[in-house]
Image (tube, grey):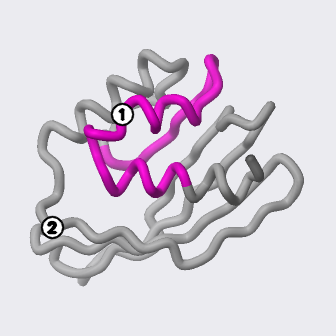
């Protein structure tokens, strides 16, 4: 699987939410690091912490969420994607950027950043 296919599978799983838990977790390496701005917590390290972080987010999912990938760039073992998320629960579209480090065909580090917040 190419790095761009891996990113595509990540977003496909994110759109399906908790129903895609195993598919999502299979994309991460054992000692992966997940950095995200949503929880306010320190980075999740390892599959158990990453799984817990996603499960926590799935407890109160955004209703009618739409998640569009705007761009994917691959540069060696690093990839970057930009995305836009929309939901009636948000005051407007939110754009973000994900930075991936990929090792052995799995995500070894994923850092999510918010680029634009709704006004």
In primary-sequence order, the first of circles 2 and 1 is 1
For residue 21, the mark is 1
Asked if residue 113 is positioned above or below residue 92 in the image, the reply reads above
Residue displayed at 34% across by 57% down: 15
- Where 117 sits versus 63, above or below? below
Is 5 in front, or is 101? 5
Q: Does residue 36 show up magenta in the picture?
A: yes
Q: Report helix, strand or loop for mark 1.
A: helix
19 in the magenta segment: yes
- Frontmost residue, 68 versus 22: 22
Q: Residue furthest right?
A: 76
x then y, percent, for residue 100? 67, 48
Instruction: Give the magenta part as a residue range.
Output: 9-38
The spot of residue 108 in percent (x, y) is 68, 32
Query: Label 1 neighbourhood size at 10 Å, few (<14), some (14-19), many (20+)?
Result: some
Choose top left, top right, bottom left or bottom right for residue 26.
Answer: top right
- Secondary structure under tag 2 reads loop
- Residue plotted at (11% across, 74% down): 88
Farthest front residue in view:
1
Assign the C terminus to one quadrant of the image: bottom left
State the residue at coordinates (74%, 52%): 3
Q: Position of residue 101 (x, y in %)?
A: 73, 43
Q: Quadrant location of residue 46? A: top right
The residue that disc 2 covers is 64
């Amino acid at each position: 699987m190419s790095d761009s296919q891996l990113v595509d599978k990540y977003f496909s799983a994110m759109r399906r939410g908790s129903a895609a838990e195993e598919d999502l977790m299979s994309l991460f390496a054992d000692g992966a690091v997940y950095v995200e701005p949503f929880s306010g917590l320190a980075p999740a390290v390892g599959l158990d912490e990453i799984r817990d972080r996603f499960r926590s987010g799935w407890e109160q999912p955004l209703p009618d969420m739409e998640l569009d990938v705007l761009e994917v760039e691959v540069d060696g073992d690093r990839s970057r994607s930009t995305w836009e998320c929309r939901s009636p629960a948000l005051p407007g579209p939110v754009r973000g950027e994900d930075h991936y480090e990929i090792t052995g065909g799995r995500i070894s580090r994923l850092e999510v950043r918010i680029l634009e917040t709704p006004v």
